[in-house]
Image: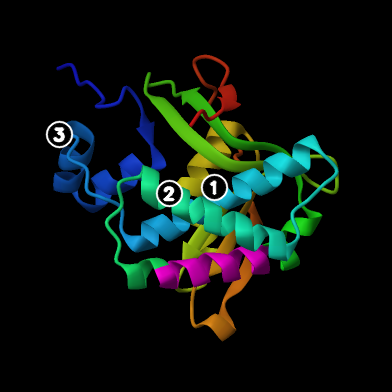
């Protein structure tokens, strides 16, 4: 029997949805019934876009946004996300999200981002497994390590801090490591708790594949177009 992948490929998010709720997978990926993003999703998208611009600027010039400058950038990105992604948010939700993205963006730039050496942002990797299934991964940031190697960074905006075990056992990050061949994986976790306790935490692990399966063709790598 022939099976056709809904989008022509699988990704960590689609596999995770299928494992969690096959009915949701059908609605989202086969019937393509989409729901407007929640305010939590809007907040996450805003911070991703903010850091994309932060690191893109750092790659092309000696300038890096200061914490105060990145606050203004986050506000602009939030307004753009709400206007372009057809979001339905109340005035109170938008006001709360405004405070959150400013606090977390400034915290991240002040405590984490300054030492990161970016190589590529929003990079797409396609890897064809031996079974013939294309695996797709979008990498938030590829960066240079102190030893000259390369690593992967992904941003996570959550209400609870990620644990090292959660990172090491993550389907998404194991797939990213497999698809890219890069063993060093970091999650930059932005925790959106009460304002006084908001934080940006960096967790990392190194993944080794003793018998990494060879793709049917070399992985392709290019920047995501928006």
Label for residue 81? Answer: 2
- Distance of label 1 from label 3 (alpha carbons): 28 Å
For marks 3 and 2, give the one nearer the viewer.
2
Q: Residue at 46% x, 57% y: name it.
A: 44
Q: Earlier in the sequence, mark 1 or mark 3?
A: 3
Q: Which of marks 3 and 2 is nearer the N terminus?
A: 3
For label 1, count other residues whose C-alpha is less than 10 Å away and answer few (under 14), some (14-19) or many (20+).
Answer: some
Q: Residue at 28% x, 47% y: name it.
A: 17
Where disc 1 sits, the SS reads: helix
Q: Position of residue 59 (x, y in %)?
A: 76, 38
Nearer-the-camera pick, 211 or 11: 11
Q: Give the range drawn in magenta.
A: 95-108
Q: In this view, does 17 lie above or below 217?
A: below
Q: Is residue 168 visible?
A: no
Nearer-the-camera pick, 76 or 205: 76
Residue at image mark 3: 31
Q: Residue at 43% x, 73% y: name it.
A: 96
């Amino acid at each position: 029997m022939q099976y056709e992948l809904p989008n022509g490929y699988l990704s960590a998010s689609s596999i995770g949805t299928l494992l969690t709720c096959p009915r949701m997978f059908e609605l989202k990926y086969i019937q393509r019934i989409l729901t407007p993003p929640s305010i939590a999703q809007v907040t996450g998208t805003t911070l991703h876009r903010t850091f994309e611009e932060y690191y893109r600027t750092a790659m092309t010039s000696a300038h890096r946004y200061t914490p105060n400058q990145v606050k203004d950038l986050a506000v602009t990105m939030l307004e753009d996300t709400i206007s372009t992604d057809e979001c339905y948010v109340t005035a109170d939700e938008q006001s709360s999200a405004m405070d959150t993205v400013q606090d977390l963006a400034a915290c991240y730039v002040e405590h984490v981002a300054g030492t990161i050496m970016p190589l590529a942002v929003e990079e797409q990797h396609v890897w064809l497994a031996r079974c013939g299934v294309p695996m797709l991964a979008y990498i938030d940031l590829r960066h240079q390590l102190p030893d000259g190697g390369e690593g992967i960074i992904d941003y996570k905006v959550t209400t609870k801090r990620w644990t090292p075990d959660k990172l090491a056992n993550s389907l998404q990050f194991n797939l990213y490591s497999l698809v890219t061949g890069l063993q060093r994986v970091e999650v930059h976790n932005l925790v959106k708790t009460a304002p006084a306790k908001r934080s940006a935490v960096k967790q990392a692990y190194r993944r080794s594949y003793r018998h990494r399966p060879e793709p049917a063709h070399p992985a392709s790598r290019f920047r995501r177009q928006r």
